[in-house]
Image (cartoon, rainbow, N blue to C red):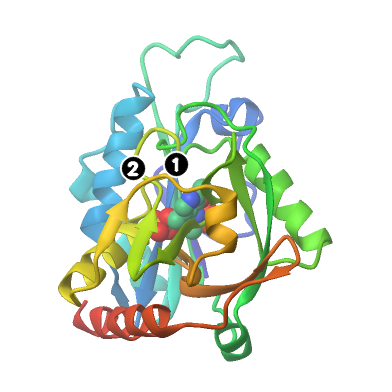
Amino acid sequence: EIAFYQDRFVDVDEAVIPIQERGHQFGDGIYEVIRIYDGKPFTMPEHMARLEKSLAAIKMPLPYPIEEIERIALEALDKSGLKEAEIYMQITRGIFLRQHQFPEPSSPVISIVVKNARTVSEEKRAAGVPVITTEDVRWKLCHIKSLNLLPNVMAKQEAYEAGAHEAVFVEKGIVKEGSSTNIFCVKDGVVQTHPATNGILHGITRQVVLDLADELGIPVEERTFSLAELKNAEEVFLTSTTMEVLKVSSVDGEKLSEERTVIDQLYTAFQERKQMA
Ligand code: PDD
């Protein structure tokens, strides 16, 4: 494990954040999580592009050119010596006296942590995971990968207390996404997921899976679907950087179909895509 804060490499446990850091006091910042397979970053350009979009959306300038941030992340990875890893990267609006408006001049602060990747057990992959649903109480700009994750934290905790793996946000009967995942269903052979609006995070894995389905000749449709449609779907699965493509076995305690033809095809294609990275 290794970390980087502002301008230097540090031990992950070293205390580095001043009290008046805006990430700490306001959650005023954005982040990314990038998976490393066998020492090589997966979809790094896509993650860096999303990072730039999140920064632009919160009107925050880059502390250094994006190439420099990528270089620091890769140097951290190299120093960590890890092969199956996760890079956590965040940029906040920096250190200033506590006032809501932006500091002048702007001085964003970057921090990075490289640690061992979390993985999903083979048992869970085979059996699928239970999910619960919860009301989407988040703000209207969920496409920004913001540090403000309190609703996501509350939802995930609700899932864990219910013995479930994920909590799925539902708004006015429409299925949005999980607390840290995107959600898909298969209906009449068509792979479906919520459109990439401001109402969800535009998951990198979500896009990889849509592309893979296309390449496999499986029809895809980005459309909204209801909770009832989800429960009656042929297949339901989650996607994320850390979970990849993961079958859902039940929703709010109601067992789903055991069908997994499309999930298995997409999971296999995903493993092949990883090797190409
Ligand atoms: N979570 N939706 C939300 C709300 C997320 O937080 C995430 C990612 C995703 C999936 O996005 P991607 O495929 O780019 O990982 C969807 C990360 C992994 C996290 O917070 O740990």
Answer yes or no: disc 1 within 8 Å of ligand 1. Answer: yes
Q: Could you tell me if residue 172 is visible in this image? A: yes
Measured as percent of width and height from the top left, residue 87 is found at 43, 62
Q: Judge whether 12 appears above or below 213 on screen.
A: above
Residue 43, picture quadrant: bottom left
Crowd class of label 2 (few under 14; some 14 to 19; many from 20; radius 10 Å): some
Taking depth in this image into account, of 211 and 224 the one nearest to the observer is 224
Q: Could you tell me if residue 9 is visible in this image? A: no
Taking depth in this image into account, of 70 and 184 the one nearest to the observer is 184
In the picture, the quarter occupied by the C terminus is: bottom left
**Image check: 26 left or right of 238?**
right
Measured as percent of width and height from the top left, residue 71 is found at 24, 57
For disc 2, the marked residue is 196
Measured as percent of width and height from the top left, residue 243 is found at 50, 71
Is label 2 in a helix, a strand or a loop?
loop
Q: Amino acid at mark 1?
A: Ile
Residue at coordinates 40% horizontally, 37% vertically from top-left? 143
For disc 1, the marked residue is 200
